[in-house]
Image: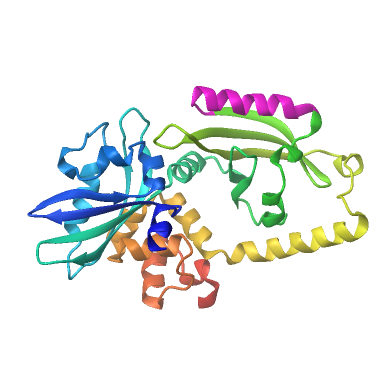
């Protein structure tokens, strides 16, 4: 059962064995093979130092340094870093090393890697542009990671994620937009796409920047989309059809929108990410400036810690030029 959980875990996981001052690849799961493009037989049993170092920021020395920093006294280590793989563009990931167990002769560490390249691109591209919304789009047409930059999103994000994204594009623009996405995916480059967005009874003219992202094995991962201009279309309310289900569905949709609007400001993790973006602070820099561990900063930024200790909150807020209550409503 544990092996099944390891093999099919969504995050890329590498098990490293340390033996006689050398480190070897002991095991890796499917997600790690997808991320890196390496197969099991290319890695298992090989010394980390012998693996190919490609590009400006090779992955293996980063893993080696993380493993070296894990000790009995410090059983975990964290890094946020770009990394390169043979034949592929530079990726950006969160790497977490955790000491597993040891015997008289060797010890084992688990390395978890979360590829956040698309999130890093959104943060870098959003800087200085004052965007409206960012989102990620799968090849199956599903929206996720929907974020508003100018106030709360007016629509229920769960409902949006359940719908085929092509339904959000007015009929006359659909073929052109889908062809544009296919071209960007084929060319592996970013580009601009303009279209009219249909959100239930509202319409907007959209100017978006889109970039496709890929795994290390070459398979498509997702599109990152940043909406840099969003203008309402006058008279769209009368032109658009009412949501399916009539008046009751419309009332339910309005209620969901109200819930989404009230919930968005409470997203302290998102507020923190926006402030870090404005200050151009990475997780590593914020950790160094506050003497808070990288793991803790990362967990707060990703929402795993919703209310940090008061001293932690004060140190972070001071670095960002705000008060703790500006980020965490619990401190108001």
> What's the residue at 72%, 47% (across, down)?
163
The residue lying furthest to the left in this view is 20
Residue 1: percent from left, percent from top: 42, 63
Q: From what the image shows, is residue 89 above or below residue 162? A: above
Q: Say whether residue 332 is visible.
A: no
Locate residue 245 relative to residue 328 in the image: left or right: right
Q: How many marks?
A: 0
Locate residue 53 relative to residue 216 in the image: left or right: left
User: What range of the chain is rendered magenta?
Assistant: 172-190
Residue 150: percent from left, percent from top: 62, 51
> What's the residue at 17%, 61% (across, down)?
107
Locate residue 271 relative to residue 72 in the image: left or right: right
> What's the residue at 25%, 65% (across, down)?
100
Q: Nearer the viewer, residue 191 or 222?
A: 222
Q: Can you tell which quarter of the image residue 309 is in?
A: bottom left
Residue 243: percent from left, percent from top: 86, 50
Residue 185 is inside the magenta segment: yes
Q: Nearer the viewer, residue 120 or 327?
A: 120
Q: Nearer the viewer, residue 126 or 144?
A: 144
Q: Say whether residue 327 is visible.
A: yes
Q: Can you tell which quarter of the image residue 171 is in?
A: top right
Residue 201 is inside the magenta segment: no
Residue 206: percent from left, percent from top: 69, 35
């Amino acid at each position: 059962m544990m092996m099944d959980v390891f093999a099919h875990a969504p995050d890329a996981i590498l098990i490293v064995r340390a033996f006689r001052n050398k480190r070897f690849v002991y095991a890796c799961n499917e997600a790690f093979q997808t991320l890196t493009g390496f197969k099991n037989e290319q890695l298992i049993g090989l010394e980390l130092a012998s693996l190919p170092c490609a590009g400006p920021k090779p992955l293996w020395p980063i893993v080696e340094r993380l493993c070296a920093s894990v000790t009995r006294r410090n059983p975990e280590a964290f890094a946020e870093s770009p990394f390169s793989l043979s034949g592929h563009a530079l990726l950006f990931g969160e790497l977490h090393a955790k000491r597993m167990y040891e015997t008289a002769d060797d010890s084992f560490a688990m390395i978890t890697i979360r590829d956040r390249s698309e999130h890093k691109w959104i943060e870098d591209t959003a800087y200085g542009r004052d965007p409206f919304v960012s989102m990620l789009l799968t090849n199956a047409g599903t929206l996720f990671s929907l974020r508003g930059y100018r106030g709360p999103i007016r629509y229920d994000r769960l409902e949006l994620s359940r719908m085929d994204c092509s339904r959000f594009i007015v009929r006359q623009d659909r073929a052109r937009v889908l062809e544009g996405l296919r071209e960007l995916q084929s060319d592996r480059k970013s580009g601009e796409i303009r279209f009219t967005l249909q959100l239930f009874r509202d319409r907007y003219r959209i100017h978006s920047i889109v970039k496709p992202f890929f795994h290390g094995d070459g398979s498509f991962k997702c599109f990152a989309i940043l909406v840099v201009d969003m203008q309402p279309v006058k008279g769209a309310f009368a032109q658009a059809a009412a949501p399916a289900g009539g008046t009751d569905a419309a009332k339910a949709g309005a209620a969901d929108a109200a819930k989404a609007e009230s919930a968005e400001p409470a997203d302290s993790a998102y507020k923190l990410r926006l402030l870090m973006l404005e200050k151009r602070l990475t997780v590593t820099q914020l950790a160094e400036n506050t003497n808070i561990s990288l793991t803790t900063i990362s967990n707060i930024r990703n929402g795993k810690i919703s209310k940090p200790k008061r001293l932690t909150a004060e140190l972070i807020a001071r670095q960002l030029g705000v008060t703790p209550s500006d980020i965490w409503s619990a401190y108001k």
